[in-house]
Image: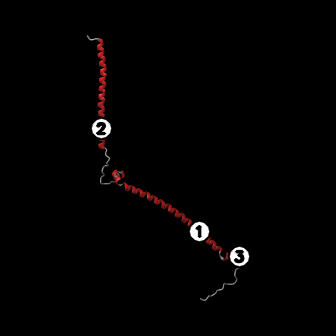
Amino acid sequence: MVKKEDIELEIQEIKTEEPADETEKEESILKEEAAEVKEHAKKAIQKIKENAKEEDPKLTSSLTLRTILGGDFLTADMVRHQIWLFVLMVLFCIVYVAIRYQCQQDLIAIDKLEKELLDAKYKALSSSSTLTEKCRESHVLEALKQNRDSLLHISDLPPYIINVPE
């Protein structure tokens, strides 16, 4: 006969075996799902690699206003081929701006020097007119009259003309 204790032991063994079987089933299911996710990720990466190209699409031979304003003609390939031209153009622009700035500075200096020259001319003209005024005969005579200690005086006789034979 089967004892009650034997039945209980068998039930306990079945209970302990069932969870082990269930965890093994769950683990196998999880492994299968992980494998499926890996495969799906690999396929997605392959599709991305196929679609992603580093090459720019070739341009059509016609340039339209839309392609110019949109910047479509500035592809990486064209820029790579013409990079030295762009560098040269930037260098010329910098030199142009520098030369223009220097020219403006020179023009400002020239204007300043022309104003100084004009002022010096006016001062020279003023000094020359003052000297001419003070050297006139009437002013010289007045100065001689005011200085009584001077032996100089106006001649009463007209000047003599001396003819020298050649």
The foreground one among 157 and 22 is 22
Residue projecting furthest to the left: 1
Task: Point out which mark residue 144 bears.
Answer: 3
User: What is the C-alpha distance between the residues marked 1 and 2?
Assistant: 93 Å
3D distance between C-alphas at marks 2 and 3? 122 Å
Which residue is drawn at the image coordinates 31% and 40% (left, top)? 45
Nearer the N terminus, badge 1 or badge 2? Answer: 2
Callout 1, which amino acid?
Answer: Tyr
* Amino acid marked by disc 3: Leu
Q: Quadrant of residue 159?
A: bottom right
Instruction: Identify the residue at the far top of this view.
Output: 1
* Dot placed on the residue nearer the N-terminal end, 2 or 3: 2
Q: Secondary structure at mark 3?
A: helix
Q: Is residue 22 left or right of residue 101?
A: left
User: Residue 166's spot in the image, x, y percent?
Assistant: 59, 88
Disc on res. 42: 2
Examine the rendered structure and indicate whether residue 109 appears above or below residue 8.
below
Q: Residue at x 54, y 65 (%)?
A: 113
Q: Nearer the viewer, mark 2 or mark 3?
A: 2
Q: Position of residue 79 (x, y in %)?
A: 35, 52
- Looking at the image, residue 157 lies above or below residue 17: below
Q: Is residue 99 left or right of residue 85?
A: right
Q: Residues within 10 Å of mark 2 (few under 14, many from 20)?
A: few
Circle nearer the N terminus (3, 1)? 1
Separation of residues labelled 3 and 1 (CA atoms):
31 Å
Q: Quadrant of the N terminus?
A: top left
Residue on which the image places disc 1: 122
